[in-house]
Amino acid sequence: MLVCHCNVITEKEIEQTIVSLLDEDPWQLIVPAKVYHAMHKRGRCCGCFPNVVETIIRVTEEYHARSKAGGADIVSHLDRVRQLRIQYGNRSRIHERRQAGNRAA
Ligand code: FES
């Protein structure tokens, strides 16, 4: 079934790309742009992205259901996420508006 009409990408091609990404790192965050980048494509109208997100969720769930990953791996992933939070800090505390003493000119 054709999922992306702009790039002429089938659902099967998207599924295969997601599995190959999961083979590299089973706990990475996969988004449509990452899938298209791996396929050397890019979103044009991006109307297919909601369907690609659904495919990512379905394929990832099936992949982990097939894998023998146990609770220890999941804890390890959560530790990695916490480590990234420490590394990059909590961005929600930083506001991006102009500082009070900042002048444009
Ligand atoms: S349908 Fe996929 S980018 Fe337009």
Image (cartoon, rainbow, N blue to C red):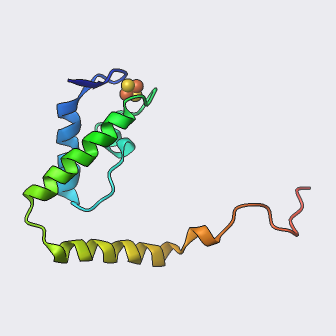
- For the image, the number of numbered tags is 0
Displayed quadrant of residue 7:
top left
| Image side of residue 30 versus residue 21, left or right | right
User: Is 71 or 41 nearer to us in this picture?
Assistant: 71
**Which residue is the extreme one toward the right?**
105
| Image side of residue 79 versus residue 47, left or right | left
Q: Where, quadrant-wise, is the N terminus in this rendering?
A: top left
Res 40 visible: no
Say which residue appears at 53% left-offset and 75% top-offset.
89
Res 32 visible: yes
| Image side of residue 105 versus residue 14, left or right | right
Q: Give the image location of residue 64, x and y in percent.
A: 15, 58
Q: Quadrant of ligand 1?
A: top left
Say which residue appears at 14% left-offset and 53% top-offset.
63
Displayed quadrant of residue 49:
top left
Q: Where, quadrant-wise, is the C terminus in this rendering?
A: bottom right
Residue 50 sits above or below residue 30 on the image: above
Residue 76 sits above or below residue 7 on the image: below
Q: Give the image location of residue 59, x and y in percent.
A: 19, 46
Residue 2 sits above or below residue 84 on the image: above
Say which residue appears at 8% left-offset and 56% top-offset.
66
Q: Give the image location of residue 80, x and y in percent.
A: 33, 74
